[in-house]
Amino acid sequence: MRSFLEIPAPIDRPAARPPATRAPLLAFVADGETERALRDALQHNGFADATITRGGIAKAIDALGTQRSPELLIVDISGVAMPVSEIHNLAEVCEPGVTVIAIGDRNEVGLYRDLLHAGVSDYIVKPVTAPLLTKALNARTHPGEPAAIHHKLGTTAAIVGARGGVGTTTLAVNLAWYLAERQNRRVALVDLDLHNGDCALALNIKPTAGLREALVNPARIDSILLERVMAPVGERLFVLSAEEPLRDKIEVTAEAVETLVTALRQQFHYVVLDVPRSPAAACLQALDMADFRVVVADQTLHSARDAVRLRRALREGSGAHHDLFVVNRHGEGGRNAITLEEMQRILELRPKTVIPFQPALFAAADSNTPVAVARRGKFADAVAGLALELSGRQPERRRWWRIAR
């Protein structure tokens, strides 16, 4: 029998990487007169090479659904019947970290307030002039301004097992893939077990030294470093997963994890963290920062006991977090398994999602579809239900809370 040290490395699979950096500015206008006025105003403010496209906010929504968002976005809402609703639609396709300035032809205080509340940095009433645009550009960097789209941060979900071997990494990988491919979100998947690289192995990609570099030297973390070290899987999923030598002692601080997650939340709609069950400060920090904390257990008494201990450690009840309990591999244990009702009684918590045990599904994985959730079925339905909790978006198939029999 081969030892675990002899397991071959994952096969490298080519994957297309989208443009590494955001464009500094994109503008979408409704007419030629506005285009000329805006171009003159942008040139006056140092944006002589800015890209201006005809089509207004409708064109912006269509374009940004298939390309990276710029750092600064100017959209024309002239003639739009429900401009605030369209701004919300725009926010759905924009990445976190985007500043949005709206221009329009309605000089109404109520509309201005509604747009600011919806996430717009400023609203300029036509005609666009250099002084008006300069004021809007300066306002986005001044403290005390209303909350804007560029202040919106991505959602963080930390996946942690009640004990080892319950399928935590499998769930994290499939959830991240589902959010990226089925909901068209930009997703960062971070494996905080730096020695094993299980997330990279599950996705059949090669681990890099980037995660260790980022966590050991958190002062270097910025968008450029992250774009260089993250491994792409398709166009929307990006992975940080290391496989460091087993004898290397790697000291990761809570501050380093906080810096990394904060930076990722500014660039991705979702940050999915595969968190080892460990009392280390870095792991506890990841759990403390998460918007959603997903505890994974199987139907064993050992797992139920450890889930109770983990819940206590997470200080459940804090309004800052949403804690979800997932039962994985439902039906695996046979006579030795405790029932879902017994688990609910022990934990005093009803499982949010129950994932059926389907070993044949994972055995059928291949290089083209390495994740089980890519295939429709009971497992995909369960992951869709969990994604629903995170995003509020409806799943593709049957209601998620039905347990497949």
Image (spheres, rainbow, N blue to C red):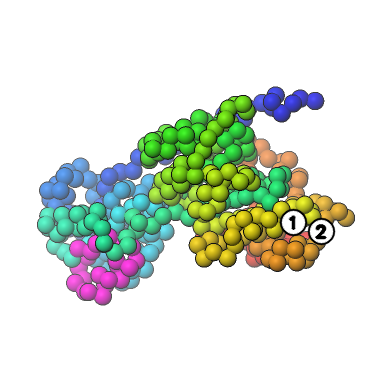
Q: Residues within 10 Å of mark 2 (few under 14, many from 20)?
A: some
Q: Which residues are magenta?
A: 104-124
Callout 1, which amino acid?
Ala
Q: Quadrant of residue 359?
A: top right
Q: Position of residue 240 (x, y in %)?
A: 51, 38
- In space, the residues marked 1 and 2 are separated at their CA atoms by 9 Å
Q: Earlier in the sequence, mark 1 or mark 2?
A: 1
Q: Residue at x 66, y 37 (%)?
A: 366
Image vertical order of residue 354 relative to residue 220, above or below = below
| Residue marked by disc 1 | 304
Q: Is residue 328 above or below residue 343?
A: above
Q: Nearer the viewer, mark 1 or mark 2?
A: 1
Q: Is residue 83 visible?
A: no
In reply to whether residue 131 is colored magenta, the answer given is no
* Residue 299 image-quadrant placement: bottom right
Residue nearest the viewer, comparing 357 with 90: 357
Residue at 29% x, 57% y is: 100
Per the image, the residue denoted by label 2 is 338
On screen, residue 180 above or below 403: above
